[in-house]
Image (cartoon, grey):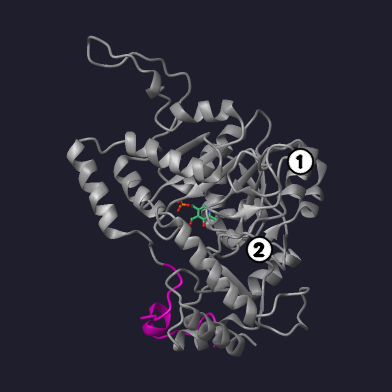
Amino acid sequence: MSREEKTYPQNILCGPFKYRLFKPYVPKEKAMALLGECLETGWIGEGPRVKEFESLVGGFVGNDRITAVNSGTSALEMALNFTKTEGRDTCITTPMTCMATTIAILNAGLKPYFIDIDPTTGLLSAEALLGVPADIVGRTAAVMTVHWGGSTANMSALGAASKQLDLPLIEDAAHALGSETPSTDCGTGGDIAVVGGLNTLSDFTCFSFQAIKHVTTGDGGAVTFRHEKDWLRSKPYKWFGIPRDERVEHILGHSSYDITEAGRKWQMNDIAASIGIASFGELDENLSGRRAVADVYDSIIPEIKEAGEGIDFPVRVRTSAGSSYWLYTILVKDPYSFSEGMRALGIEVSNVHVRNDSYSVTDPYTGGRLELAGLDYFSDHAMCIPIGPWITTEDAEFIANAAMKHGR
Ligand SMILES: Cc1ncc(COP(=O)(O)O)c(C=O)c1O
């Protein structure tokens, strides 16, 4: 019987786990108070709470050109729709991501063109981007990079490569609220940029506030924009194309406005934003808790030097300084025996996302599973171990030592 066909008992697959990979992080009392106030106002649709949430997140990342939406997937699709131009029907991206990245590309009417990742980081590399054939570049609308687990690609190099190819760059930062990146648009603000800030090199940064993200609104997302024109376009776009901020009340009841572009019904509402505001209050603690756990793991699990079957597994992937550590990813020899060993100890582990070229919905664009050396290596070995403020130092030592034992 192959490993895939083997059936596992339910308790191995679904817990109960003592050490969880993910937990929604919302302070209940604060959220209940904000929700209660919201319900009392009688205004639960998009309103002042959404604006407040936007200014909290925008202030945090250093970019007030921000628009909140109803999911990270909508955020991606909005950014993609804004990059589309006549004759350009492709998005160059990484296959090592959540299916949401590819689904947004497909729903924006674009073809995904998957390029290889660096097997030691799981991230897109500028070299791979610069290696894309000219005819593909010529019909490409955008490049989409994904900050796997909160670790950022080399944004200076990726930004420069996108510029060289004259392509807009979108960051799928669903995992990366609070990540820092050493890439800056020189001259606009120091050596370090917070992902989504104005001094990063991308044109759009897309966040997710889905249930288990650093900040959650239940479901939600946001785009931060580099260019004011895109930001201004997003405001009506997120709600049918109605310029809600410019509405003038009309004696017949309906406000008078013109709709110049068919938008979507993607706005965030005040109920979601109330939960988000409560959750946002925990962000600093959430990030520092994750970074403290990462420090313990880093001290026990060696970093990969180079990819190859001869290496001593397990190793941790190279993670950018300032990662938000939504995931902590290690490469293990055999993910199946690793998972069996870890789960038996009550430690939830997972590969979290499956390479997107393995889904048949992408077959028309890939012709089937691709052969990309970096991707093959990473997806054959990558597993994530629990990280979050709910993991104590003792827990982290226990988990890292168990990973060293079961990952070899
Ligand atoms: C990398 C990545 N991109 C996009 C998304 C989509 O975000 P959402 O679930 O908010 O639509 C996710 C979701 O978890 C994700 O992991």
Q: Does the magenta stretch include residue 113?
A: no
Q: How far apart are the alpha carbons under marks 2 and 1?
A: 22 Å
Q: Which SS does the magenta portion mostly show? A: loop
Q: How crowded is mark 2: few (under 14 residues within 10 Å), some or many (20 or more)?
A: some
Foreground residue among 258 and 246: 246
- Position of 308 relative to 257 (above/below): below
Q: Give the range drawn in magenta.
A: 1-22
Out of 359 and 279, give the one closest to the viewer: 279
**Mark 2 / mark 1, whichever is N-terminal:** 1
Residue that label 2 marks: 369
**Residue 91 in view in this figure:** yes
Along the line of sight, the residue nearer the viewer: 119 or 299: 299
Please state which of the two labelled residues, at mark 2 or mark 1, is closer to the viewer.
1
Question: Which residue is disc 1 drawn over?
Answer: 137
Residue 308, above or below 32: below
Compared with 344, 81 (above or below) is above
